[in-house]
Every structure is written in structure tokens, then in C-alpha cells.
């Protein structure tokens, strides 16, 4: 049953994605904010498909902690899931991403339209300068700059592997950083076909105000994201019958 349900969801999800790649074509000549709303509609519908077809619900904790205006969002990265789910949580989000993604037909065009922040990993130290300048400009226009500090998807429970690019951004942007923990990798595992029913939990943590020393920020951000993600991982394992974990304190949460 799990295989059949996963097969059905993957078929519907990617067919839906292709449809929206076509539907978004007129958006390239529309105002950027209108285009962002179109993409967010796709993301909401994708979460709906995940719930209805795969039986995977979403619980968002701490939504009320998201400040208005520009911010740096540092999120745990375990799955493809958060690359679109995070779009539904913020007003005007954009991503830090590798430049090569901008070269993909259709997809790359839309990343450019959304004013995403590309990183040329072959450019060395100048890549940080270019990334920071672009990210700062977007944040000053009230946008939320989403970065995955580990740079790539990591299996649930894997040792932390944070990179200092996020600390460089924090130090130079002058905006609060919002740490985000999650357990998506249990339900939408990286490089796997299976989509497990249950509840993906994502937690918005207290924003870290600008102005901390770089090393102090880097340590605090990492500690908060890892503590949250490990706690959510334990909850998910308990739900899936993969291990026991103690109950966690009640928090403000919303279900999608």
C-alpha cells in the first residue's frame, strides 16, 4: 500500500509540476510580486496533494515568531519538501542557490524572475561578495532570504555540517536571522521514492537579532536548529514506530 500510494503521489506531483511550469510562462512578464503569488499557489496545492494522496500532513510551530519585513531564514535541509513548503510561510521569499540552477530551461527562467540569489561556487571569495550584495538588496526591499546553511540535503540525524556562508550573510545584512528546524527527511527521504504518511513538523524558532559576533551567532544558530530538528526527529520516529521519544512541551502550532 505504501508503494502504491507513493507511486500515485509522485506521478501526480510531477505531472502537476510540469503543468505549472507551463502555466507560469505568462508570469515572466508580470510584476515580480504577482509571480511570487503564483508560485506560492503552486506550493500550497503541492502540500494539499501530499496530504490527500500520500497522507502526509504538515504541522507548523511558531509561525507567529516570523517578523515583518526583511530577514535571513536559516533552515535545516533534509528533503526536496522544504524547497517549496517554505514558500508558503513567508510573504516575499527568495532563495540562496547555486548559479547552475539558473541555466535550466523554464525552471531557471523562473528563478531569475523571482530574483533568487545565485552563488558561483567557482568564484572563490568573490562569490561571497556578490552573494551578499544581492541578498542585502533583496532584504532591504522587505524580502526573506532563505538559505540552507549546510548547503545540501542531509539525512535525518546525520552529524551537522554547517558552512560559514550563513554567518557572513548575517554579519553583513543587518537583519534578524530566523532559524528553522524540521523533520521532513523522515517522510520525504532524499533520493528515495517512498513518501510516508504522517505529520511533517516544521518549527520557526526565535529570531536572532542582528549584531552578535560572527562566531557567537554561528554557534547559537547551529545549536538552535539542531536541537529543534533532533526533537522533531524523535517525535517523527515515535509516530512512525521507529523508536520511542518522550513527549514534548505544548507549543503554538498550525496544521496545513
Image (cartoon, rainbow, N blue to C red):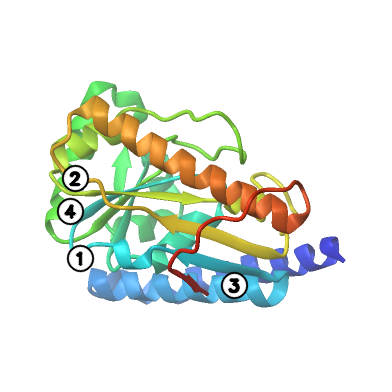
The Cα atoms of the two marked residues, 4 and 2, are separated by 9 Å
150, 11: nearer the viewer: 150
Judge from the rendering whether residue 87 lies leftward or rightward of residue 71; answer left or right.
right
User: What residue appears at the point 19 percent right and 46 percent down from the top-left corner?
Assistant: 209
Q: Residues within 10 Å of mark 2 (few under 14, many from 20)?
A: some
The Cα atoms of the two marked residues, 1 and 3, are separated by 31 Å
Q: Residue at label 4?
A: 139
Judge from the rendering whether residue 233 lies leftward or rightward of residue 240; answer left or right.
left
Q: Residue at label 3?
A: 16
Which callout, 1 or 2, points at the residue further toward the start of the chain?
A: 1
Which callout, 3 or 2, points at the residue further toward the start of the chain?
A: 3
Which callout, 1 or 3, points at the residue further toward the start of the chain?
A: 3
98, 87: nearer the viewer: 87
Q: Residues within 10 Å of mark 4 (few under 14, many from 20)?
A: many
The quarter of the rendered structure image containing the N terminus is bottom right
Label annotation for residue 210 = none
Q: Residue at label 1?
A: 68
Which callout, 4 or 2, points at the residue further toward the start of the chain?
A: 2
Q: Residue at label 2?
A: 134
Q: Residues within 10 Å of mark 3 (few under 14, many from 20)?
A: some
**Of marks 1 and 3, the one in the foreground:** 1
The Cα atoms of the two marked residues, 1 and 4, are separated by 11 Å
Task: Point out residue 227 in the picture as x, y percentages from the top left corner.
Answer: 47, 41
**Secondary structure of the residue carrying numbered label 4:** helix
Task: Point out residue 49 in the picture as x, y percentages from the top left corner.
Answer: 62, 74
Direction top: furthest residue: 124
The Cα atoms of the two marked residues, 3 and 2, are separated by 31 Å
**Of marks 3 and 4, the one in the foreground:** 4
**Of marks 1 and 2, the one in the foreground:** 1
Task: Point out residue 100 in the picture as x, y percentages from the top left corner.
Answer: 41, 40
The Cα atoms of the two marked residues, 1 and 2, are separated by 20 Å
Which callout, 3 or 4, points at the residue further toward the start of the chain?
A: 3
Amino acid at each position: 500500500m505504501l508503494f502504491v500510494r507513493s507511486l500515485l503521489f509522485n506521478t501526480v506531483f510531477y505531472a502537476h509540476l510540469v503543468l505549472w511550469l507551463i502555466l507560469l510562462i505568462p508570469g515572466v512578464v508580470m510584476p515580480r510580486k504577482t509571480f511570487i503569488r503564483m508560485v506560492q499557489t503552486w506550493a500550497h496545492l503541492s502540500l494539499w496533494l501530499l496530504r490527500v494522496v500520500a497522507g502526509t500532513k504538515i504541522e507548523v510551530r511558531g509561525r507567529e515568531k516570523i517578523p515583518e519585513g526583511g530577514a535571513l531564514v536559516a533552515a535545516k535541509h533534509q528533503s526536496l519538501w522544504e524547497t517549496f513548503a517554505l514558500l508558503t510561510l513567508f510573504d516575499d521569499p527568495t532563495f540562496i542557490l547555486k548559479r547552475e540552477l539558473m541555466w535550466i530551461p523554464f525552471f531557471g527562467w523562473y528563478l531569475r524572475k523571482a530574483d533568487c540569489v545565485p552563488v558561483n561556487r567557482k568564484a572563490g571569495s568573490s562569490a561571497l561578495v556578490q552573494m551578499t550584495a544581492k541578498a542585502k538588496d533583496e532584504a532591504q526591499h522587505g524580502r526573506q532570504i532563505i538559505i540552507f546553511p549546510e548547503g545540501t540535503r542531509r539525512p535525518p540525524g546525520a552529524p551537522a555540517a554547517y558552512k560559514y556562508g550563513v554567518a557572513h550573510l548575517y554579519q553583513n545584512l543587518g537583519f534578524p536571522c530566523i532559524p528553522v528546524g524540521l523533520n521532513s527527511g523522515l517522510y520525504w527521504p532524499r533520493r528515495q521514492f517512498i513518501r510516508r504518511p504522517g505529520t511533517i513538523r516544521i518549527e520557526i524558532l526565535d529570531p536572532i537579532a542582528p549584531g552578535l559576533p560572527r562566531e557567537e551567532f554561528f554557534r547559537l544558530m547551529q545549536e538552535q536548529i539542531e536541537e529543534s530538528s533532533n526533537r522533531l526527529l524523535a517525535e517523527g520516529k515515535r509516530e512512525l514506530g521507529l523508536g520511542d521519544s518522550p513527549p514534548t512541551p505544548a507549543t503554538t502550532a498550525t496544521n496545513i
